Image: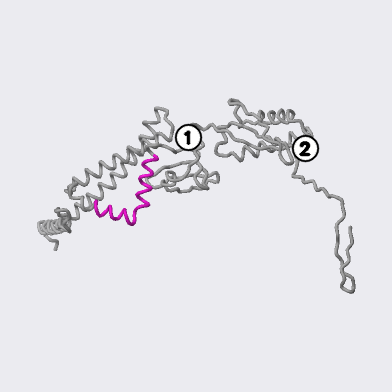
Amino acid sequence: MEEPVETVWEQLKEWALMVYQWFTYDLFNMFGEDFNLIDIIVFLSSIVLLIYFTGKIRKLLVNRILARYNLDIGIRQSIGTIVRYVLLVLGFIVIIDSAGIHLSSLTVLAGALGVGLGFGLQTIANNFISGLIILFERPIKVGDRIEVGDITGDVVDISARATTVITNDNISIIVPNSEFISSQVINWSHNDRLVRFRYPVGVSYSEDPEKIKQLLMEVMEEQTGILKNPPPDVWFDEFGDSSLNFNLMVWTSMYVQRPKALRSQLYFSIFKKFKEHGVEIPFPQRDLHIRSGELPVELKNQNGLDTHQTE
């Protein structure tokens, strides 16, 4: 026989009451407050939602709102990251206060955290603070072409702990933020993406420097990657050991990420131009002078006696 509806309803009420008791059972006491499973679920869910929505707000601010003002991508990324950090701090304060934990009760935890930072979290804290300094002072920003240590590439992301740099080989390198504060950083596009490169060229002493300058200027004028304003120039650098040395001074904004590619194109064109006009590209030469004279030579005869001869 089927159980009466009242009996089934009573069983459901008992199960619901049991589940409710499980969720409302006080698991531990912290800072004078009792915490149960519901409190923990609400607390953790609030933190996850805070992190998720602040990330969405950052993307909306960077890609939609600030993009309307034609701001540089690096400036938008910095503003968006700073706004997210502010919202995270305010959100954590609200969540902690809503959970019944008074901020005054966190002094003991803050002291313990300070000891932990002193022993094991120095590097993480250093990188986080360095990241804040980078965002506020902006020595580098997203989109910049930089050199730090042996790493050369474009900045694509600045996070709380590290900065992501993409090299010309499409390799992502994660650089701790502290490296940009404690080390020397070369920022090729700090002001703008207009840079000047110097490429050396050597020719034989038998060549006319004015002719060489004219040929080199023709080569640079034919290159699409070299700017016409500021104009390129040829400098007579020095009288070398085996050659007359020139420097090609070229301005570009297209080859900031690929200076070696521009140099390769120039050298191909220069070699072709020199070959057409019979210009000699020298190689290192050394002249050996032999001075004539007499050198005394000591010889020994069969009896072991020394004899002297001259050559």
The residue nearer to you, when weighing 161 against 310, is 310
**Image quarter (top left, top right, bottom left or bottom right) of the N terminus:** bottom left
By secondary structure, the bulk of the magenta-drawn segment is best described as: helix
Of marks 1 and 2, which one's residue comes earlier in the chain? 1
Task: Find out whether residue 119 is within the magenta segment.
Answer: yes
Report if the CB atoms under discs 1 and 2 are less than 8 Å apart: no
Q: Quick one: label 1, few (<14), some, or many (20+) residues within 10 Å? A: some
| Residue 50 quadrant | top left
Can you give x and y, in whole percent of width and height, for residue 234 in the image? Answer: 66, 30
User: In this image, 130 relative to 41: left or right?
Assistant: right
Count the marks.
Answer: 2
Residue 82 is one of the magenta-drawn residues: no
> What kind of residue is marked 2?
Glu
Classify 35 as above or below 134.
below
Comparing 156 with 55, the one in front is: 156
Q: What element carries label 1?
A: loop
Q: Which amino acid does label 1 sit on?
A: His
Asked if residue 148 is positioned above or below residue 311 in the image, the reply reads: above
Helix, strand or loop under label 2: loop
Mark 1 vs mark 2, CA separation in Å: 40 Å
Q: In which quarter of the image is residue 279?
A: top right
136 and 59: which one is in front? 136
Q: Which of 126 and 166 is in front in this view?
A: 126
Residue tagged by mark 1?
190
**Residue visible at 48% across and 42% down in the picture:** 185
The magenta stretch spans which residues? 110-134
Q: In which quarter of the image is the C terminus?
A: bottom right
**Residue under numbered circle 2:** 280
Q: Residues within 10 Å of mark 2 (few under 14, many from 20)?
A: some
**Position of residue 68 measured from the top left corner of the image (x, y, whole percent):** 39, 28
Name above or below for residue 296 compared with residue 265: below
Residue drawn at x 23%, y 49% is 43
